[in-house]
Image (tube, rainbow, N blue to C red):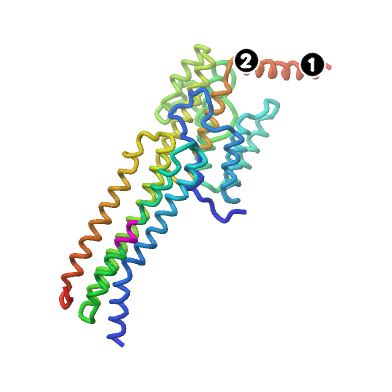
Amino acid sequence: MRASTNFYHLVASLPYMPRTFEVERLPISRIQLQQRLKLLSDPDRRVVDQIQEFLLWDRQRPERTDEEVEREYDRLVNSIKNPLVRDMINHRMDVRTINCALRRRRLGLEPPSGVGQYVEHIRKNWRHPDFRLAREHPWIPRLHETLEAKQALDVERQLLAVTWNRWVKLAEEFYFSFETVLLYLARWEIVDRWTRLNRSAGEEKFDHLLMEVLDGHASIDR
Amino acid sequence: MEIFFVSLLGWAGVFLPTALGAIGSILGCARAGMAASGALLDVDGGYGRLVGVSALPSSQTIYGIVVTMQMNGQFSDATAAGLFSIGLLVGLALLFSAMYQGSCCASAINTTKSKPEVFGLAIAPAAIVEGFAVFAFIFALIVSGGIPGSAG
């Protein structure tokens, strides 16, 4: 058990994070990163686990209901004390809610139930092209166009860029602190996600999702 | 009682530059040293340079010792108040300069490990901080020599 984290040691031991997430290799492997994170004190480690849990939860299983997701979100947010972690989670949820709303509207569906500060606002401004959120989120019109053009990779790139830019801007305010480590992890997660985006992995994921859907229908038929 | 108190302050003033300078150097060298040892996990060479940079904040202790030696020869009841004032203020200047120089060194180490070619530029901020410590040191020597009632 560690009494307190030596952030000078930990931050200096982490490799340089590239300026863009569009790179071919991770700056540090997952195993090495986990080893470095052992330098954290127990309370800091718990907060890092929370954020990592969220980042994994972010890739939720498709069979979860909206209610389950909402409950999980509420549980997670209520258990978090660190303001930066709350901010990070809320930002990710906002981006996901807006993305989900744009996709649902394009498909002619109802506004998403979802979680986060914009759910009600989006419902009220459902017919407006950018849900009247373009001032706070200037990336919405461009994302809307890209979605219309069915450019799946560009959509993913834009969504990752929105979050990446936010983390980069926040990271400029911290040097050798816990926040530096959290923002490093958040950016690492984006680079990890981007480097794993390739054609064969995409096809595999698509096949997997298709099989799940088909299995679901098969069980209904029975 | 009053003379005792004045003497106490005077002697404290004589030793404060060394004590506060040493505390600053401890904190500064520790910060930079921790960054250097962390950086060693991520680099394949140039270890000596990284560890060497972490020793930069030690100079404040040397400045403190020199000021203490200078003031030691000036002590009298008449100069005690002046020595205390100068000792405390120069000590604080040395303390903070060493602490923040340590932070500058830690940043320089963090930058240098991924971009070794900017080593010289990266330690420039630490050198600038050192400059302010030198100003405080020199003027402490000058002012302490001019305290009314002192031998200098």
Tell me residue A70's x, y (percent): 63, 35
Q: Earlier in the sequence, mark 1 or mark 2?
A: 2
Q: Which residue corresponds to the image point at 27% horizontal and 66% vertical from the top-left?
A: B67
Q: Which residue corresponds to the image point at 53% horizontal and 12% vertical from the top-left?
A: A150
Q: Which residue corresponds to the image point at 62% horizontal and 15% vertical from the top-left?
A: A200
Tell me residue A177's x, y (percent): 47, 47
Closest to the observer, B116 or B7: B116
**Residue A188 on the magenta segment:** no
Residues at marks 1 and 2, common chain?
yes
Q: Is residue A210 left or right of residue B14?
A: right
User: Magenta residues, as a range?
Assistant: B59-63
Q: Is residue B21 left or right of residue A199?
A: left
Residue at the spot of label 2: A200
Q: In which chain is the residue bearing label 2?
A: A
Closest to the observer, A207 or B72: B72
Would you place residue B30 above or below residue A174 in this image?
Answer: below
Q: Secondary structure at mark 1?
A: helix
Would you place residue B147 above or below residue B61 in this image?
Answer: below
What amino acid is labelled 1 in the image?
Answer: Ala
Q: In which chain is the residue bearing label 1?
A: A
Tell me residue A166's x, y (percent): 45, 33
Mark 1 or 2: the one toward you? 2
**Residue B61 on the magenta segment:** yes
What amino acid is labelled 2 in the image?
Answer: Ser
Q: Which mark is residue A218?
A: 1
Mark 1, other Cα within 10 Å: few <14 / some 14–19 / many ≥20:
few
Closest to the observer, A61 or A220: A61
